[in-house]
Amino acid sequence: MKKLFTVLFFLGLTISFSHIYAQEVVKFSKGKSEKTIAVTLSKNASKTYSIEVRGGQAIIVAALGNQAENIAITLQNPSAASDHETEPGGLRVLANDSGKYLIRVANTGNSTKTFNIRFFAGNGKHY
């Protein structure tokens, strides 16, 4: 009984915390450096995206559309970037190191929002 309780306890913890670390991986089509994703977020909800780039590349993320108001986009691992700027409904990052960058998109409004997010990764001159 004690083993069953322990297994169920850890299973519950795994399920409870899996949404915190769940990430949607942004992958670009061959030869492309942009991707647009449709998103629906309930009020005060967020979603994390993972994008892999090489050092020196720029990452630009923007919320698009008339529902993009009250959308906050932030870099979750800023120490990996040589520079980054958060702007209303957007984010610009200059990658210092090659690797995975985590982008959090949050609905800070009081209602469910459906909008598009455009991801760009490419030459650092776009930063």
Image (cartoon, helix red, strand yellow):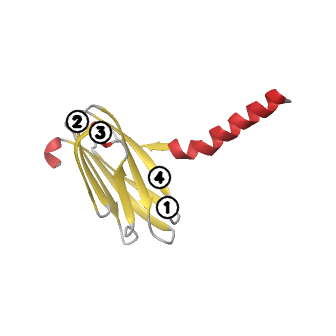
Which residue of the protein is positioned furthest toward the right in this rendering? 1
- Specify which label sits upstream in the sequence, 1 or 4: 1
- In space, the residues marked 3 and 4 are separated at their CA atoms by 20 Å
Which residue of the protein is positioned furthest toward the front in this rendering? 2
- Specify which label sits upstream in the sequence, 2 or 1: 1
User: In which image quadrant can residue 31 be found?
Assistant: top left
Q: Which mark is residue 79?
A: 3
Identify the element where label 2 is drawn: loop
Identify the element where label 4 is drawn: strand
Give the foreground label among 3 and 1. Answer: 3
Q: Quadrant of the N terminus?
A: top right
Residue type highlighted by circle 2: Asn
Give the foreground label among 3 and 4. Answer: 3
How packed mark 3 is, by other alpha carbons closer than 10 Å (few <14, some 14-19, many 20 or more), is few
Q: Which residue is mark 4?
A: 47
**Left or right: residue 39 compared with residue 124:** right
Residue type highlighted by circle 3: Ser
The residue sitting at 51% across, 59% down in the picture is 45
Give the foreground label among 3 and 2. Answer: 3
Q: Which residue is mark 1?
A: 40
122 or 105, which lies in front? 105
**Left or right: residue 126 compared with residue 49:** left
Q: Which residue is mark 2?
A: 96
Which residue of the protein is positioned furthest toward the top in this rendering? 3
Residue 21 visible to an observer of this rendering = yes
In the rendered view, would you say 84 is above or below 45?
A: above
In the rendered view, would you say 96 is above or below 65?
A: above
